[in-house]
Amino acid sequence: MKTWQPFTQPPLDPLLTRAKDNASESELFFRRALVLVFTVFLSFLAVASRLVYLQVLNHERFTTLSDSNRVRLQPLPPTRGFIFDRNGVLLADNLASYHLEVTREQVKNLDATLAELRERIALTDADIERFRKLARRSPPYAGVPLRFQLTDEEIAKLAIDLYRLPGVDIKADLTRRYPLGPRAVHAIGYVGRIDEGELSRLDPGQYSGSTHIGKTGAEKSYEAVLHGRTGYQQVETNADGRPLRVLSRTPPTPGQHIYLSIDIRLQAVAEKLLEGYNGAIVALDPRNGEVLALASQPIYDPNLFVNGIDFASYRALNTSKDRPLLNRALRGVYPPGSTIKPLMALAGLNYGVVNRYSGVFCPGFYRLPGVSRKFRDWKHSGHGSVDMDRAIAQSCDVYFYNLALNLGIDRIHEFLDQFSMGRPIGIDLPGEKGALLPSQEWKNRVHKQPWFAGDTLSAGIGQGYFLATPLQLAHAVAVISQQGKNFAPRILYATEDPGTRAKTLEAPRPLPPVTLKNPRYWDAVIAGMIHVVEGGTAHRIGIGAQYRIAGKTGTAQVFTLGQNQRYSAKNLAKHLLDHALFIAFAPTEEPRIAVAVIAEHGGGGSATAAPLARKVMDAWLLDKYDDSITTGIPPAQDVPPHGTE
């Protein structure tokens, strides 16, 4: 049974029973509130200071940085100018095409992106390597071309997945086209992709966005005229760098059109005539230096180079024994042979060594005093007694051996230098060679040997160390035709503003004239050159001519004959045959064309080179063109004649 006990309350905690201190609590709350307010004030002060720093003190800087994230400055490459011949026939224009471009700044993993692109379209190792080289030289925000001339199928494949490939764009552009293919390639030249070395030398402001540049020929010489001026536009972009809208635009200035002085019909004739030979034909207007035709054979298609030639094709061109990439008209160097004899005759007259009636007996060879060696004449039976006129007409070597010895190499060098022999004349095309006009100083410097009398004899007939280009020979005969008036050869005929179509004609570029002590010396030598065609070594080309021609045949040896050897063409391989040369101008009364022809391993100048020159002159002077040759050449356009605006 339970026992009930009375309830007892436990004792209270002294802390609980202590009286409440309101004053202390209020003071504590106030202190805490004050700290909080001060902390908030400091925080707002810091924020306000930062806002003042960002929005007041550095407003312009951060506005610019902000805009640069959404506003991009894009270059607008100019349209390249067209190239026409002197009659307005189109030689080079631009076609619409598309290329693939990569902007490195927007690409997270470049290697992965390139690999992914390679799965979708054809990209060669050369494409990748070229892209990487250009990318190293380009700003990270600039687009770098990866592949040109995308096909419709390739564009479709890429367009589907472009949203997954930030930094990759398909760009529309214009690609260079040469509608006549290989025709006049050595004069026109071609454009190609800008390489790493060129990129480091070019003005970034002028070539931003440009992918091509002139590499050879007129395309290179007149790059500044054809290229134009780059424009710019400000584009607003999204976070992925994709353009949203154009904010402002400074349009590019297109390049000017240029008209070359060549006549494409005459050029076609010259190139056709050279088929079967490696060689060159240069035709000039002697009155002003305009290049009417500049043919070098063999030729090649410049369209192959515009967007990058494949390795196999380039190797085939570069290793070919015929060297099609060599511009023989400007860079081919050959012994001028007997084509130099009119200049030698002028030198003899000017220095008083001979007169036009001075006679020499030619037995078929020449001996230096006290020397047993015979320097052979091309005609083994000899020419008998010859004066200057007959020596030029019949190309008597013995006469010019004797003349050269009496002149001496120093006077030969001094006189021929006036005709720009041995140095570049200054044509407005790249790569012209100076060839070689020998002298005592040159031989001592280069060969460490003294000059011998036999060297002088060889130089007197355009052999030995003597070398010239076809352009130099054409220029020399042009100067003779003008009796000393001298003009630099030039390929530019006119420029044209593509907007207004206003043409500016190029003025002739005079060079120092060749002056003789007596102007009648010109007549004496020109008479001899007329007799070359009228009864001399090139008499066959004078038959039936409707105008009078002054010319000089030449034959350049490609190997040296022994003392008792005779040249026999029928017993030699083609590559050992002599080079055939011919220089001429016509009509003799008022010369309008000067021509130089060289056919490598063509044999004699009279049999091979002279007939080619006659056909070139017929085409130009008589407007005689074979339709089978000029087929495919568009009709001429409206171009003002020289001397008018």
Image: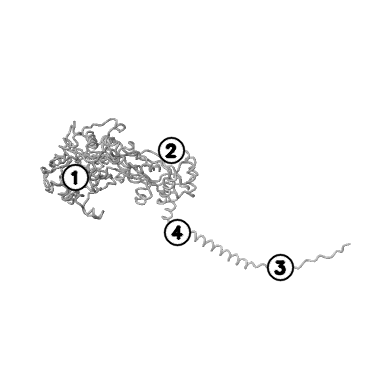
Residue carrying label 1: 486
Residue carrying label 3: 17
Q: Nearer the viewer, mark 4 or mark 2?
A: 2
Mark 2 or mark 3, earlier in chain: 3
Circle 3: element type: helix
Q: Amino acid at mark 1?
A: Asn
Q: CA distance from mark 3 to mark 4?
A: 58 Å
The percent coordinates of residue 629 (x first, y second) are 29, 32
The percent coordinates of residue 185 (x first, y second) are 31, 40
Q: Are marks 3 and 1 in contact (CB under 8 Å)?
A: no
The percent coordinates of residue 203 (x first, y second) are 34, 50
Q: CA distance from mark 4 to mark 2?
A: 53 Å
Residue 422: numbered disc: none
Q: CA distance from mark 1 to mark 2?
A: 52 Å
Circle 2: element type: loop
Residue carrying label 2: 151
Mark 1 or mark 2, earlier in chain: 2
Q: Nearer the viewer, mark 3 or mark 4?
A: 4
Q: Amino acid at mark 4?
A: Tyr
